[in-house]
Image (cartoon, coloured by chain):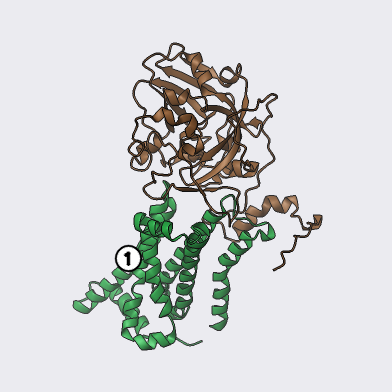
C-alpha cells in the first residue's frame, strides 16, 4: 500500500512538475504564446480531472470489489484541491496581480468566476478536515460534510462550461463523466432501497445487490 | 541579492532539430497534451511565403515592438481549422490558397468574379504595423502587408444603395477540417458599414512580415480592421457583397448577447463574461503585467468620427 501511495503521489505531481518546467523553459518545454492563460487552463483542468477521479473511487470499488482503492481517495482529493488552488493562485497573483478591485468585480459580475470561487471555498473545509484526527472528531458529520464533493464537482464542470467561448466539446466530456459518476450513486441507492423494501424482481439483481452490501460491509483488507 | 548573468549557451545544450521537431510526439506520449491547451511551443517553420518585392512603409504604422513570427503564426483563432489556438497552424498546412476566386456582387456597377491576381495585381503594397486586439483580451503587434480596401472597392463602383459590405470566408470542409463541425454557422460572414470599409485604416491584407500570408493567418486574402476586435478581420475572403441592409455576422448570429455588429474595441463595454478593460500583450512572458486597453484600440483619432451620435454601449 505504501509503495502504491508513493507512486500515486509522484504521478499526481507530474502535471505540476511539467508546469514548473514549461514555465521556466527547461528541456525545451514552453507554455506557448500566452503562458498565463496556458497555466490557468492546465491547473484548472487537472483540478477537475482529479476531482472526477476522486469521485470515481467509490463506483470502481463497488464494481471491481477492490476495496483498497478507498485508501487512495484522500490523496486524490487533496491533489484536486492542490491544482484548483494553483489555478486560483495563477489567476489572482499572476494574471490579476492581486488587484483586489478587479478580482472582486470578476467574482461579483462574472457568473463563471462566481461559480469557480464557490467551488474553491467549498473545497477548503474538505481539505482542512481530511486528516484522521478530524475524521475521528467529526464522526458521522464528517461524511455529511464531505458529501459537498458532489455540488463542488457540478460547480467545477459548470465553471469550465461557461468560460468556453464557443466549442463546448471538451466541457461536455467532463459533464458526461460526472453524470455517469453521480448517476451510478443514484442508481445504486435506488437498488438498495428497492432491495430493502420489496421482493426482488430477479435473482441476478438480488445477487448483485447482495454482493454490493457485502462489499460495503466488509472492512478494507490490509496489505 | 546578486543577479547573475545567464551563461552563454553552448551548442551542445541546444536541442537538436530532430528532437525539436519530435517533441510534440514526446509530449503526447507522456500524456500531457491530452487537453491540447498546453502544447509545447509549436515548431514554427521559418517564414516560407514568397517575399513581396516592393513594400512601402506607412505612416499608419505603430512603432511598438512587433510580435515574433512564431507568435503571429502559431497562436491564432481561425475556427475553420479548429478551435484551439494551435489548430490553425497545425491543420492548415495542406490548404491550397491558389487558384483563388473572389465573387463581387450586390449594389455595385462592376460586379464579377476576380482571381487573386485580378484583385491584387495593380495595387502597390505597403506595410502596416498594427495593434491587433482579440475579443479574448490578448493582443499582438503585427506587420501586415496589403493595400487600402477603399482602393479595391472603388474599382467595383458601389452605387448609392450600398450601405454595407458583406464578406464571406471560403467554405470547403475538405480543406478546412474545422468546418466539419457546426461550431459556427458556416461559411463565416463578416460585415462593415461602407464608411468603415472605405476608411483608410482598413487594409485588404495579403501578407505579413514582408511575405505572402501563411494559411493559418487567412491566406491568400483577408481584412485587417485594427480598431475592431480581431474576429471582424475576416480571413480567406471569397465573397464581397454590397448590401443596403446590415448583414448578420457569424458571431452575432451565434451569440447575439456577446458579439455585436460593430465590435469596436472598447474598454468601457465589457463582454458579458469578462472585462475588456485590460489586455495581455502576447510575447511578454509569464510575469508581464496586463496593459490598459485603449478606446478603438488606440485608433480613436482616426475613426471616432465614424461613430458620432452612436450609442456605443448599445451598439457594441
Position above or below: B202 against B10: above
Q: Residue at x 50, y 43 (%)?
A: B82
For disc 1, the marked residue is A183
Q: Residue at x 55, y 38 (%)?
A: B131
Instruction: Estimate the x, y position of residue B168 in percent, counting from the top left.
Output: 45, 28
Element assignment for label 1: helix
- Taking the view exactly as shown, the residue that stands out farthest to the right is B11
Q: Image quarter for residue B29?
A: bottom right
User: Is residue A37 rendered to the left or right of residue B105?
Assistant: right
Instruction: Estimate the x, y position of residue A166 in percent, counting from the top left.
Output: 41, 46
Chain letter, disc 1 residue: A
Position above or below: A218 against B213: below
- Taking the view exactly as shown, the residue that stands out farthest to the front is B301
Q: Which chain is green?
A: A
Q: Image quarter for residue A212?
A: bottom left
Q: The brown chain is which one?
A: B
Amino acid at each position: 500500500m505504501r509503495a502504491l501511495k508513493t507512486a500515486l503521489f509522484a504521478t499526481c505531481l507530474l502535471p505540476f512538475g511539467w508546469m514548473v518546467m514549461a514555465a521556466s523553459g527547461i528541456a525545451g518545454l514552453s507554455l506557448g504564446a500566452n503562458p498565463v492563460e496556458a497555466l490557468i487552463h492546465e491547473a484548472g483542468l487537472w483540478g477537475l480531472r482529479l476531482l472526477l477521479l476522486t469521485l470515481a473511487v467509490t463506483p470502481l470499488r463497488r464494481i471491481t470489489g477492490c476495496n483498497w482503492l478507498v485508501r487512495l481517495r484522500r490523496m486524490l482529493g487533496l491533489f484536486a484541491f492542490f491544482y484548483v488552488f494553483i489555478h486560483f493562485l495563477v489567476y489572482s497573483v499572476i494574471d490579476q496581480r492581486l488587484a483586489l478591485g478587479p478580482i472582486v468585480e470578476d467574482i461579483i459580475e462574472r457568473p463563471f468566476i462566481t461559480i469557480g470561487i464557490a467551488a474553491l471555498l467549498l473545497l477548503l473545509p474538505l481539505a482542512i478536515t481530511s486528516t484522521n484526527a478530524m475524521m475521528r472528531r467529526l464522526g458521522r458529520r464528517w461524511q455529511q460534510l464531505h458529501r459537498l464533493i458532489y455540488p463542488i464537482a457540478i460547480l467545477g464542470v459548470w465553471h469550465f462550461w461557461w468560460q468556453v467561448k464557443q466549442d463546448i466539446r471538451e466541457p461536455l466530456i467532463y459533464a458526461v463523466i460526472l453524470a455517469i459518476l453521480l448517476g451510478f450513486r443514484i442508481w445504486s441507492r435506488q437498488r438498495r432501497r428497492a432491495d430493502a423494501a420489496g421482493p426482488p424482481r430477479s435473482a441476478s439483481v438480488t445477487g448483485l445487490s447482495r454482493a454490493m452490501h457485502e462489499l460495503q460491509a466488509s472492512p478494507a483488507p490490509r496489505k | 541579492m546578486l543577479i547573475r548573468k545567464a551563461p552563454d549557451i553552448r551548442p551542445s545544450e541546444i536541442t537538436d532539430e530532430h528532437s525539436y521537431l519530435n517533441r510534440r510526439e514526446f509530449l503526447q506520449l507522456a500524456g500531457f497534451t491530452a487537453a491540447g491547451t498546453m502544447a509545447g511551443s509549436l515548431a514554427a517553420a521559418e517564414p516560407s511565403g514568397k517575399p513581396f518585392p516592393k513594400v512601402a512603409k506607412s505612416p499608419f504604422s505603430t512603432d511598438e515592438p512587433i510580435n515574433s513570427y512564431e507568435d503571429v503564426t502559431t497562436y491564432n483563432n481561425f475556427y475553420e481549422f479548429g478551435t484551439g489556438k494551435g489548430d490553425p497552424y497545425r491543420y492548415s498546412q495542406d490548404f491550397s490558397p491558389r487558384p483563388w476566386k473572389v465573387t463581387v456582387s450586390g449594389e455595385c456597377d462592376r460586379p464579377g468574379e476576380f482571381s487573386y491576381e485580378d484583385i491584387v495585381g495593380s495595387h502597390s503594397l505597403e506595410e502596416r504595423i498594427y495593434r491587433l486586439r482579440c475579443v479574448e483580451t490578448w493582443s499582438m503587434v503585427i506587420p501586415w502587408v496589403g493595400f487600402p480596401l477603399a482602393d479595391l472597392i472603388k474599382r467595383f463602383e458601389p452605387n448609392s444603395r450600398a450601405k454595407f459590405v458583406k464578406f464571406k470566408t471560403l467554405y470547403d470542409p475538405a480543406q478546412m477540417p474545422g468546418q466539419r463541425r457546426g461550431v459556427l454557422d458556416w461559411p463565416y460572414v463578416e460585415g462593415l458599414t461602407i464608411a468603415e470599409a472605405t476608411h483608410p485604416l482598413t487594409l485588404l491584407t495579403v501578407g505579413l512580415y514582408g511575405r505572402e500570408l501563411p494559411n493559418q493567418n487567412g491566406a491568400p486574402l483577408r481584412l485587417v480592421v485594427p480598431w475592431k476586435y480581431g474576429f471582424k478581420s475576416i480571413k480567406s475572403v471569397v465573397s464581397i457583397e454590397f448590401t443596403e441592409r446590415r448583414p448578420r455576422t457569424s458571431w452575432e448570429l451565434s451569440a447575439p448577447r456577446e458579439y455585436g455588429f460593430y465590435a469596436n474595441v472598447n474598454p468601457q463595454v465589457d463582454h458579458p463574461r469578462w472585462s475588456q478593460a485590460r489586455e495581455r500583450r502576447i510575447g511578454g512572458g509569464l510575469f508581464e503585467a496586463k496593459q490598459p486597453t485603449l478606446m478603438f484600440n488606440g485608433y480613436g483619432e482616426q475613426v471616432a468620427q465614424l461613430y458620432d451620435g452612436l450609442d456605443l454601449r448599445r451598439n457594441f
